[in-house]
Amino acid sequence: MHALQYAVTLPADYDMGIIRDRVRTRGHLLDDFDGLGIKAYGIRERGVDGSPVNQYAPFYLWADPRAMNRFLLGDGFRGVIRDFGRPEVQHWMGVHHERGPASGTAPRSFVRRTETLSEGADPATAVAEAVAEQQRLARTDGVHTTALAVDPRHWELTHFTLWAADAPEGEGDRFQVLHLSAPGAGRLPTGEQW
């Protein structure tokens, strides 16, 4: 499994209705994209849920890395580049994925929390502790899906959790989910992947 996210930060006075309309009219295009596990079409609005910015920032979990490559190098991502410029794409190796009790419902939000490992931290121990935290979280009422990914370049852990309702306040950036494409959700490996 691979995780991916790019963020398009928009002007403070940007009409986020434009992004909502974009997702409403185009979101279904990845509903059957072979190799995609899930794509959560996420946005943050300035002043909502503590967000300092307007942002379009979809989050992906890929079941097949070749599909991720087809997306990034194909027509799907060309539309993003054409409309917004070429954003920086964050990419992580997935180390844990689990569905929660609300996986059968449409999610309304997600939280992305990143933590940097300290210089002296053992990566395997830190990941094992984070996986245990994700496993507990996956049993929480209202959780749709939870995943943990690692960026070994910066030694950062990214915790990603989809919620059936508004995400609870706490650590991490909170996003509204406008649409969920999940053609390969069942193909994403469950549990630890290391």
Image (spheres, rainbow, N blue to C red):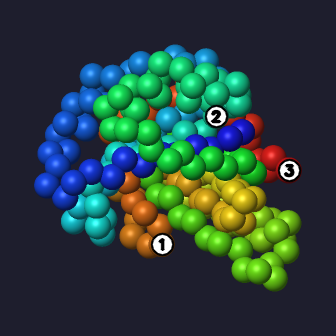
Residue that appears at 52% across and 17% down: 32
- Say left or right for 121 vs 180: right
Q: CA distance from mark 1 to mark 3?
A: 26 Å
Residue that appears at 85% across and 50% down: 194
Identify the residue position indicated by label 3 in the image: 194
Residue 111 in the image: state x and y as whole percent: 47, 58
- Say left or right for 4 vs 194: left
Above or below residue 176? Residue 47 is below
* Nearest to N terminus: mark 1 or mark 3: 1
Above or below residue 192? Residue 181 is above
| Contact, mark 3 vs mark 2 (Cβ under 8 Å) | no
Above or below residue 2? Residue 33 is above
Is any atom of residue 148 visible in this view? yes
Q: Residues within 10 Å of mark 2 (few under 14, many from 20)?
A: many
Identify the residue position indicated by label 2 in the image: 62
Tell me, for residue 171, which label it has, or none.
1
* Nearest to N terminus: mark 3 or mark 2: 2
Q: CA distance from mark 1 to mark 2?
A: 25 Å
Residue 5 in the image: state x and y as whole percent: 52, 46
Three-letter code for the amino acid on which mark 3 is drawn: Trp
Q: Secondary structure at mark 1?
A: loop
Q: Quadrant of residue 51?
A: bottom left
Q: Secondary structure at mark 3?
A: loop
Tell me, for residue 126, which label it has, or none.
none
